[in-house]
Image: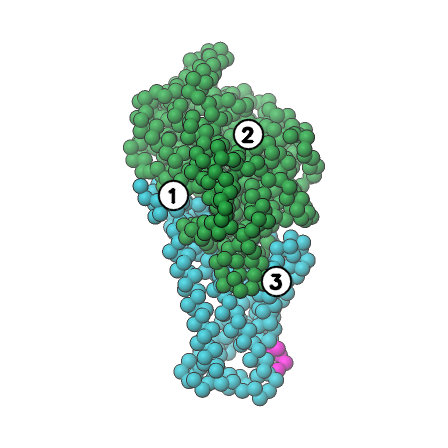
Chain colours: A green, B cyan
Amino acid sequence: MADAHEVPEIHDDIETPALQPGSMGHLAPYPAVEKHMVPLNFPAARVPDWEKRGVEKLGEMLKKYRSLQVYMDICVKCGACADKCHYFLGTGDPNNMPVKRAELMRSVYRRYFTPAGRMFPGLVNAKDFDEEMLKQWFTYYHQCSQCRRCSVFCPYGIDTAEITMAAREIMDAIGVGHKYTTEIVAKVHDIGNNLGIPKPALSGTLQFLEDDMLENTGHEIKLPLDQEGAEVLLVAPSADFFSEPHIQSLMGYAKVFHQAGISYTISSYASEAANFGMFIGSYEQKKKISKRIAEQARALKVKRIVVGECGHAWRVAYSFWNTLNGPFDFLDNRYPVPQHICEFTHDLIGRGALTFDKEANDAYVVTMHDSCNVARASRMGPNPGGQFTIPRDLIRATCNHFVDMDEDTIFEKTLCCGGGGGLLTDELMDLRVKGTMPRVTALKKVMAEHKVNFLALICAICKAQFNKMLPMYGIPMDTVGGVHQLVSNAILLGKNKGIV
Amino acid sequence: MLTFLAYFTVGVFVAGFLWKISVYARTPAPLLIPTTPAPVTRGGVVWRLFREVAFFESLFKADKFLWIAGYLFHAALALVLIRHIRYFCDPLPAIFAHYQIVGILAGIAMVGALGLLLARRFLIDRVRHISSVADHLFLWLLMGIGGTGLVMDFFLRPDIIAIKRAMTTLWTSPSASLSMASPGDVVFIIHILMVAVLLVVFPFSKLMHLGGIFFSPTRNQVDNPREKRHINPWYAD
């Protein structure tokens, strides 16, 4: 798999490529089969009258989602978004321009739902929902990471993520699913997390990490599992339990809880912050997956919920939980519900509960990659933009050397890692390598100019993606790490214990 | 005939516009999806939408040349429309005597800006690739309207007294009509027919961005999901 792609050359700046029509037309993900589709209540295979059913489903969605209805109508095709998508910048395929990606659905919308498209299809580019169109949908709606960068620049705020999610839901409804995402959703329902880690394995890992931390620090730092009556339920992405560098951040969270003297627990039933229901666009799945967490918060009688470093999980938790499974009035209302681990740590620093030895991170010159769902679909703290300042405050509190990347590639204009939105799967490697190129360009620039050697971030998918991508671009794998990895390195244990 | 045309075009425009707006207003927004950082208060959202509509804030971030061309067109169109009040309003407030020069300069700017927007559709490969026949036709139609307006200002003057009489009596008199005595009068008829086409297609086309932007959830929602529970109307427990 890994040799089926070429790694783009990195230039000094991010350049808009010339159009290369069809250059990514070959790259569709593996389709889901019966065993993936049925557990999610989707048809086992493509339904016989799929053309009709697909159009009907689009009609249904138009009545349920104002975003979709408005965004189908009002695009003027100005092209402001055209050079903003990292997949377009990396591939030059015009169907990866957000306007053109959306046009795949708009042309069908016009054909069946507008007078002009019914009467003059050629004039307004209205097209039938046929075999060729479905193929294009399956291909290019799986080349969008739902990162919303286009929605920042659109004069009407048209959000391609909404359109991609709707397209995937329509395809699922006619039995045309994506293996990777549907398989993972089923795993959460079966076992409790995306990775399919059963309770004994989880428990063993946590034990191992506790021993490891005891050996390295001399302190008994706990990673409690299923402990009723704890103050906080910690919900981390399951990658934090098993993958590098994710696991370093998990130890960082544990040290923060330990040092603050706040009791907490991880849940084996709700051992997953990620919610791939969002990637497949399914409201029902989003609700069902996150419901496990609300149920566990009740069952374990906790007072607060804190969410670990995971981008789309934070979007779902912050923006959607209250709607999907609220109200959370059984929790302590002095704290935000849910609270991000960065907010949690930031708050403790503000209250003087934590102290750091910044020199512990002196080997690093750090830069911050803002993950798309955190940056453009959520907030931290009371003020807009807290999602940018709070993690940076944590880095500055724990490191002596920090520098930001080019301003067009951070904050709300941040570039996707190239693996979000349910695309972190090996068969899409070619897309992932090309899609990460703009981010790597900005990173290489600060590496050259400021000797940056640590890319800090707060997303499990970004970590996994960069871990694989950076070595291809000649950057060491261990350049990538979580913000709480830096916290973990610098936190002083033992002194000043507990909240003052 | 003229009265019928007026009622028909304005009727289709108003009814179509209101119908579309009511569809947008009635369609539920199940989840909060503002593009963040977003305002955390209702007042903040009003200010965000104002900046978007008055200054094209997002477009400014995206593409400076397009912002100049697009802003010039929309601002000039607004000034030109204000100038047109003089043809419908009797007696005319005195201020309009001094406004003529503004209106005429705006007319020239408007057609020039449309030229820039059209040039983009030919010259930039990405924009050329996404442009449909309809995208081109809208620009030609608007240039036709602006162009015939300028022709009447500078070259072929129609009988403006008769036109104003027709326009002010149009709604009440079925016999209101336009003369075709001079070439200028014919230019005027072409001008007004193109306006009629524009009004009729408006609600069924991308021109609905005028109303739609106010209903765009990424721009009009308050970022307060933790503070206030947002209810999805079609999924009640």
The residue furthest front is A48
Image quadrant for the C terminus of chain A? top left
Residue B234 in picture, x, y percent from top left: 35, 47
At 60% from the left and 76% from the top, the residue drawn is B148
Q: Which mark is residue B133?
A: 3
Disc ID at residue A443 = none
**N-terminal of the two: label 3 or label 1?**
3
The kind of residue on which mark 3 rests is: Val
Q: Is residue B49 visible?
A: no
Q: Are marks 2 and 1 in contact (CB under 8 Å)?
A: no
Q: Nearer the viewer, residue B94 or B82?
A: B82
Residue B152: within the magenta? yes
> Residue placed at 60% from the left, 34% from the top?
A427
Residue B222's place in the image compared with A340, above or below, is below
Looking at the rendering, the stretch of residues picked out in magenta corresponds to B151-157
Q: Nearer the viewer, mark 2 or mark 3?
A: 3
Q: In the rendered image, which residue does mark 2 sit on?
A: A463
x and y, in percent, of residue A330 in the image: 29, 32
At label 2, which amino acid type do we have? Lys
Count residues near mark 3 (Cα–Cα under 10 Å), then give few for <14, some for 14-19, many for 20+: few
Q: Which residue is mark 1?
A: B224
Rendered view: B196 above or below A2:
below
Q: Mark 2 and mark 1: span between their CA atoms?
A: 28 Å
Residue type (three-letter) at the residue carrying disc 1 = Asn
| Residue A367 vertical position relative to residue B24 in the rendered view, above or below | above
Separation of residues labelled 2 and 3 (CA atoms): 44 Å
Distance of label 3 from label 1 (alpha carbons): 42 Å
The image quadrant of residue A444 is top right
As helix, strand or loop, the secondary structure at mark 3 comes to helix
Residue placed at 36% from the left, 41% from the top?
Answer: A323
